Amino acid sequence: MNPGYMVEVANVNKVFHTHHFLQRHEESGKRAWYRKKTVRAARNISFGIRKGEIFGLLGPNGAGKTTTVKMISGLVRPTAGAVYVDGMNVDTKRLATLRRIGVVLEGTRTSIWPLTPLENLAYFGNLRDVKGPVLRKRGMELLDLIGLKDKMNVQVRHLSRGQKQKLAICIALISDPPVLLLDEPTTGLDVQSSRSIKDKILEITRELGKCVLVTTHDMNVAQELCDNIGIIADGRLVACKPTHALIDYFSDVTCAFYLDRAADPTPFLGIPGVLSAECNSEDGEYALVLRLIRQEDQRSAALYAIVELLKNSGRLLHGVERRKQTLENVFIQLTSGLPPATGD
Amino acid sequence: MGFFLVLKAELVRTFIIMRRYWFATLTSLVIGYGMLMGLILGFMARRDQVTEMIDNRFGVDPSSATNAALGLIIGSFAFGIIGIFSQGLQNMARSGQLEQLCLSPHGLVTNFLARSLVGSTASILTSSIILFLVAHSVEGRIYADPLPVAALLFLTYVDLIGFGFMLGGLVLLFKQTGQIAVIVRIALLGLAVWASDRVDTGYAVLDALVHILPVTDAAICLKHVLIRNQILLDTGQFVSVFEISSFYYLVLNSLVWTAIGISVFKWMENWSRDKGTLGSY
């Protein structure tokens, strides 16, 4: 256990067993009376989140993001490994750790729809031992902070999806927990609502000094919001770095050579240090996009060889660009094992 | 302290919803009143034939109209409490509220105790209103002494929650237990209507089994207090609930079922955490 972390996930594994009766086998097509399936939702996942930090957990559908959030909040028990919140083991001190966590899981379903936002906050506040004037004051402050004060007496069923999502965040914060877990807080929201939620999360984290874990599919949200990012695929944490480091790690290897006509990428693959090559047509120009090895000396040699090859082929070189990597490209590369599609 | 805060939260939530959806609350009262009045008036209109028929067939107390009506009310009470743990829990899982309750630092048992207590109080209140209206309509032929009835209803509630917790645990694990829960609820309703002064099926094992089931002794005690009290007005005799064995069965049953129910529920809650089904639908 690392004392510097507010939330620590240490070598966590989760295996689910499902039981099926009279189900047809996916490959053989044969029906069996009974079949047991095993799903490994988490494989040796380890990461930590410090106070005042926003940690993004990215991954494709079914990668294990929500399972990880549920393991931190104690809704799912790890098969092996341990989760610590504020130094306490979630499995053995579950109720005590729940006092330090605010969770938003499928935010629009969190609240009680026949009640108003204020009544919801009173209800969930009482469930978390907040009462009296403190509850009312904190409720009003949160509604004001999140921008729902004018809707505080409207039944939740009349609110929009974005407003329900905002209310879910208020509910998670009503007991002023030091840790906030947000499972896909911007899914299904329009651009404005998504931006608004993102801004509010930033505001809350910076102003209130919370430790936040966000799972999301939205790369823009992750890139703009998160200090650190973990990418999860098939239950494995394939990358876990500060956001800028994760992007930098890939950004210095992709170069585009703008040419007057198309070039066959095959000869370039023979140059030592060239990892991949493709030629695209972009705005009337042809771009030869090459991924190069990270080592500087080898990359330099490769670049000279590329220019030489282009010169010998008689093509006009209009320009060279080192491409800025986006988190989306990094994500796709890490989760699919394919070279990233580059973009400006 | 924490339990009372949860209780307060549940109380406020329940009564806000009852007030906000007043039409639904009112119509359920009217329907309850109508059904009960129909039953009682039916018995009254054909009292001689019915009691003769029942006497011939079953040899039960002639106050069978009251017996059946009370059985229906007690059965509905049991139906409602078990429903909070079965269908109620299933609906909460579907709406997403269950996940929030699972994340409460008080734990699911405390939350469900509070929720069922408030649900039962609301049920007792509506049943009392219906009973009062029915008693008024039939010119006081049903008499209810509030204090012993309230005490017995509380014992009935305790008797039922253990059973409810066990069913609730099953719902946490499997979710699709709707039909089993419906069968159990209908069986309890039937048991409450059927149980009169004493249990005598003719088979000792069956008698013991019926006593073990929740609601049997609760129904016997409640009917005893309510019906004998009614007789008290006519004969001047007082028959105490402490004189019947069912009261002691009820107390014992309440303690045993609650302990078993909560233990099984906690075990199933942990199992559902392993399975990953806690809180989700």
Image: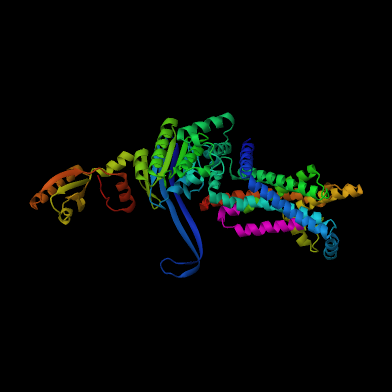
- Residue pictured at 60% horizontal, 48% vertical: B266
- x, y (%) of residue A224? 35, 39
- x, y (%) of residue A256? 19, 47
| Magenta-drawn stretch, dominant element (helix, strand or loop) | helix
* Front-lying residue, B159 or B61: B61
**A140 on left or right of A310:** right
**Residue A246 quadrant:** top left
- Tell me: residue B122, above or below residue A51: below
- Residue pictured at 27% horizontal, 50% vertical: A341
**Residue B103 quadrant:** top right
- x, y (%) of residue A97? 52, 39
**B10 on left or right of A21:** right
Answer yes or no: is residue A1 visible.
Answer: no
Residue stretch rendered in magenta on the structure:
B168-193
**Which corner quadrant holds the C terminus of chain A?**
top left
Q: How many marks?
A: 0
Residue B185 is covered by the magenta coloring? yes
**Which corner quadrant holds the N terminus of chain A?**
top left
